[in-house]
Amino acid sequence: MSVAAVRGDARRLPLPDGSVDLIVTSPPYEVLAYLAGIIDADGCIRVSKDRPTRDRVTPGYHARVHVRMVERAAVDLLGATFGGSIWTHRPTAPRGRKLNVWDVSDVQAQRALEQLLPYLRIKRPQAENALALRRLRAESHRHRTKVIGQKTMTGQYGQQIITPITCLSDDFVSRCDSFYLRSRALNQVGMRGEVGGECL
């Protein structure tokens, strides 16, 4: 028995023998259009930047999409359609209401944005910028060309093998950083510094 695996939401359907199989389908355009409207109004699409660490000498760059809303139904639909994480965020105002948060990053964010892109209006530039970063990151293995040291390994017959330690090139990091800076510019408009939903 074959099962079609297409990116999108998933549901379980009973088979003739009473068992249950996983059927993966692409979300209907009505659902995608509705969720795109939610993200246009209450979502944030951005490129985030992580500082270098002991194990990573160059910054990390990630495509990220999240929504914060008082109502839970749309957040649950986003999670059911695209996966990701859902949690409750404490209100910042003394009498504020708790906010429900949906968040996806990297591959999940890319898959969501690829399906939402035709329906986005306000956040379309942010989505295109995040997807451009993901396309660049897909070829990152070709850009580990900057030598930052060397390590010595022992071969099968006891011989010493010296191999270079490499990281992403300065040019590649600079290109990633340009998407990060553009994301910040796209999400900072007006006195409050956001367009639509507030970015985490």
Image (cartoon, rainbow, N blue to C red):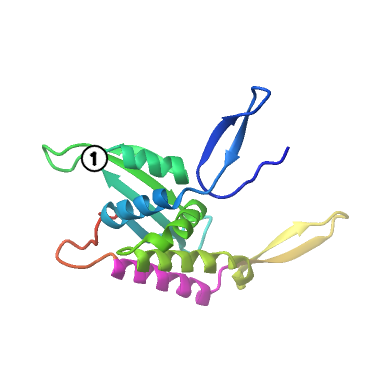
Counting from the top left corner in percent of width and height, residue 191 is at 14, 65
Front residue of this view, candidates 180 and 174 = 180
**131 is higher (above) or lower (below) than 92:** below
Residue under the image location 62 percent in, 66 percent down: 141
Q: Nearer the viewer, residue 120 or 90?
A: 120
Q: How many marks?
A: 1
User: What residue is shown at x 60% (from left), y 68% (from top)?
Assistant: 139
* Magenta span dominant secondary structure: helix
Q: Nearer the viewer, residue 180 or 173?
A: 180
Question: Callout 1, which amino acid?
Answer: Val
Q: What residue appears at the point 49 percent right and 71 percent down from the top-left corner? A: 173
Quadrant, the N terminus: top right
133 sits to left or right of 155: left
Q: Residue furthest front?
A: 16
The local crowd at label 1, few if under 14, some if 14 to 19, many if 20 or more residues have their Cα within 10 Å, is some
Estimate the x, y position of residue 49 in percent, counting from the top left.
Answer: 40, 61
Can residue 200 be seen here? The reply is: no
Q: Secondary structure at mark 1?
A: loop
> Taking the image as drawn, is residue 69 in sight?
yes
Q: Nearer the viewer, residue 132 or 79?
A: 79
The residue under label 1 is 70
Q: Is residue 64 left or right of residue 145?
A: left
Which residue is at the far left? 95
Residue lying farthest to the right in this orientation: 157
What's drawn in magenta, residue-wise? Answer: 167-186
What percent of the width, then of the height, locates residue 28? 46, 49
Residue 4 part of the magenta segment: no
Residue 186 x, y percent position in the rendering: 30, 68
**Left or right of 110 in this view: 43:** left
